[in-house]
Each structure stands twice: as structure tokens, then as C-alpha cells.
Image (cartoon, rainbow, N blue to C red):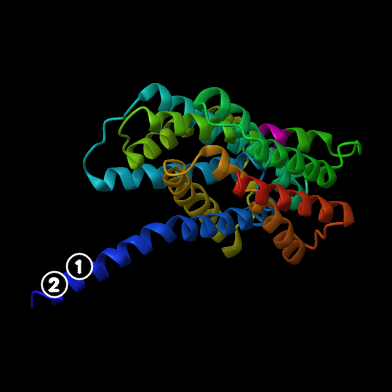
């Protein structure tokens, strides 16, 4: 019996080590796939509702889901670090959601997703300033390769569709700012992730009534696909996705995590091509290759 107990303990320890080692990678893989497909879902569901109506429904579902889980837990309901929670809620939940929705209305789903992923470049700069994270030579090369790839995909010298492109870049900046502020908050001491997530979501929901005059709920084209799409965007992409992103942010450098997330626009372009017929051209394919080079470089830093 005495020989079995150490063996069992060793097996349990090895299983725990394996789980802790691979769980972040598995979670990240699932997260990037879910977020990439969300751009296709949003593009389709925006055909059945006006942009502001879509934003209000999607954000309400996601925010109430997060806060509902916090209420269901039954303890630790008092908000932590209200100032930081306010900043993240207004930046990430409200402002980011508004800008990315408006960008998707006029822009192709794949291209818009790529522009939103100027986020890693903003994160690298903001992390250097707010988090004092190192900015290595490989990181600089990765930024150059990634930026060149984005320029090839976006083709900013083409004047058509400038507004949605600018909105998508602004969305990327807002996402980056929210992520860095969240990482900084987590570094300031013990943080209840669910409490922080629930309250920032509720705070981000607060300004939505100001947009009600611009919404048109009567014009919604209801269908099973629309309902499922809104549940996907609200519950899975917004609520579950935010919790997963926060969990990863607390365990990995913000700049490394965000730059590896550049795989999302590549997946989104592929999904948009197969689902919506938005096939990328040669310039966009070359841009994806450069982004891939950037991801490799950031992984080696």
C-alpha cells in the first residue's frame, strides 16, 4: 500500500502538470477560433438588424450573462477597484463594441477583422508605457512584418471605404487599451476575475440607453439564424470570450498574447471566404504571410 500511494501521487502530479501546461494553449486555440468566426456571424446578423439595434442586443446579452454568473455565485458582489472597472467597461464593452459594429456595416468581414488587429501594435506600445514590458529586437521586427502585412491587406492607398477602416483601427486601439488596463489592474494585487468581469460588463452596458433613439427594433428580421447568431455573439464571443481573455492576460505578457492573436484575422479571412464568398487577393495573401512571420518572430523573442 505504501508503494501505491506515492505512485498514485506521482501520476496525479504529472496529470496536473500536463493540464496546467497545455490548458492555456488549448484555451487560446478555442478562443481565437471562436472570435474569428464571430466576424462572419456579425456580418450575417447585421443584415437582419440595424447596427445600433445589433449592438444593444449583443452587448445586453453578453453583459447580463457575465453579471448573472456573478450573481449566481452568491458572494463577493461588491465591485473591486471601481475606477479601473469603470475605465475597462467603458473602453472595452461599450466603445470597442460600438466602433467594431459600425466598421462591419460598410466593410468586408475579413478585412475589418484584420484592421481590428492593429490591436497588437497598440498593445506593444501601451505595454511598454503602462506595464514596463520589454520591447526586444525580435518584437520590433515582428511589428514591422505585421504592420507591412496589414498594409498589404488593407491597401490604404485605395480611397474606397476609408471610414470603416478608420473605425476598425480605432476599435483595435480601444481593445488594446482595455487589455492593458486590465493587465495593469491584475498586477496591482489579488483580483477576483469574475467580479471584475461582471461589473465592467454592467458598467459598459450603462451608456446604451443613450443609443436607443438610433435603434429600430421593429425593423428586425427575426429568424432562428438571427437568434442563434445573437446568442453566439453575446454569450460565447462576448461573455465567455472575455473571461478566457482575462484568464490568459493574467498568465502571459500582454504584448505576446495579443501578437499571437494575429492568427484570428487570418482565420477570419479564410472563414469569410468560405462562408461569405469574400475571397482574398494576392496582396492580402502576401499580407497574411507577413503577419505569420511576425507571429513567429514574437514567439522567439
| On screen, residue 74 above or below 280 | above
- Residue 162 percent across, percent down from the top left: 83, 35
Question: Is 278 colored magenta in this rendering?
Answer: no
In the rendered view of the protein, which quadrant contains the N terminus?
bottom left
- Residue 51 percent across, percent down from the top left: 66, 41
Locate residue 256: give its quadrant. top right
Side of 123 where 62 appears, left or right? left
Question: Is 168 colored magenta in this rendering?
Answer: yes
Asked if one can make out residue 208 in the rendered structure from this viewpoint, the answer is no
Q: Name the residue under label 1.
A: 9
Which mark, residue 5? 2
Side of 198 where 228 appears, left or right? right
The span shown in magenta is 167-171
Locate residue 44: give its quadrant. bottom right
Classify 10 Å Cα crowding around label 2: few (below 14), some (14-19), many (20 and above).
few
| On screen, residue 19 above or below 170 | below
| On screen, residue 7 above or below 250 | below
In the rendered view of the protein, which quadrant contains the C terminus?
top right
Q: Which of 163 and 140 is in front in this view?
A: 140
Q: Residue furthest right?
A: 158
Asked if the residue under mark 1 is in contact with the one under mark 2, i.e. CB atoms within 8 Å, the reply is yes
Residue at image x 24%, y 37%?
76
Q: Main secondary structure of the magenta part?
A: helix
Residue at image x 48%, y 32%?
204
Side of 203 where 223 appears, left or right? right
Element marked by disc 2: helix
| On screen, residue 68 above or below 137 | below
Amino acid at each position: 500500500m505504501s508503494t501505491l500511494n506515492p505512485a498514485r501521487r506521482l501520476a496525479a502530479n504529472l496529470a496536473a502538470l500536463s493540464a496546467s501546461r497545455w490548458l492555456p494553449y488549448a484555451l487560446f486555440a478555442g478562443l481565437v477560433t471562436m472570435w474569428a468566426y464571430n466576424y462572419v456571424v456579425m456580418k450575417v446578423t447585421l443584415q437582419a438588424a440595424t447596427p445600433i439595434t445589433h449592438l444593444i442586443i449583443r452587448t445586453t446579452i453578453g453583459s447580463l450573462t457575465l453579471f448573472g454568473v456573478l450573481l449566481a455565485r452568491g458572494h463577493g458582489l461588491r465591485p473591486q477597484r471601481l475606477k479601473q472597472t469603470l475605465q475597462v467597461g467603458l473602453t472595452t464593452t461599450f466603445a470597442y463594441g460600438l466602433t467594431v459594429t459600425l466598421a462591419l456595416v460598410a466593410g468586408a468581414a475579413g478585412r475589418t477583422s484584420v484592421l481590428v488587429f492593429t490591436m497588437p501594435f497598440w498593445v506593444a506600445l501601451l505595454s511598454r508605457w503602462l506595464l514596463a514590458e520589454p520591447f526586444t529586437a525580435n518584437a520590433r521586427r515582428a511589428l514591422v512584418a505585421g504592420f507591412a502585412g496589414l498594409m498589404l491587406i488593407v491597401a490604404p492607398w485605395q480611397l474606397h471605404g476609408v471610414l470603416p477602416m478608420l473605425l476598425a483601427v480605432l476599435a483595435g486601439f480601444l481593445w488594446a487599451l482595455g487589455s492593458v488596463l486590465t493587465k495593469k489592474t491584475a498586477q496591482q494585487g489579488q483580483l477576483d476575475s469574475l467580479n471584475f468581469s461582471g461589473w465592467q460588463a454592467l458598467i459598459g452596458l450603462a451608456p446604451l440607453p443613450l443609443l436607443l433613439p438610433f435603434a429600430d427594433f421593429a425593423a428586425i428580421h427575426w429568424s432562428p439564424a438571427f437568434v442563434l447568431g445573437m446568442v453566439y455573439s453575446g454569450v460565447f464571443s462576448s461573455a465567455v470570450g472575455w473571461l478566457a481573455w482575462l484568464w490568459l492576460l493574467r498568465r502571459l505578457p500582454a504584448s505576446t498574447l495579443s501578437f499571437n492573436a494575429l492568427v484570428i484575422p487570418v482565420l477570419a479571412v479564410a472563414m469569410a471566404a468560405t462562408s461569405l464568398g469574400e475571397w482574398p487577393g494576392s496582396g492580402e495573401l502576401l499580407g497574411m504571410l507577413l503577419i505569420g512571420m511576425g507571429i513567429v518572430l514574437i514567439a522567439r523573442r
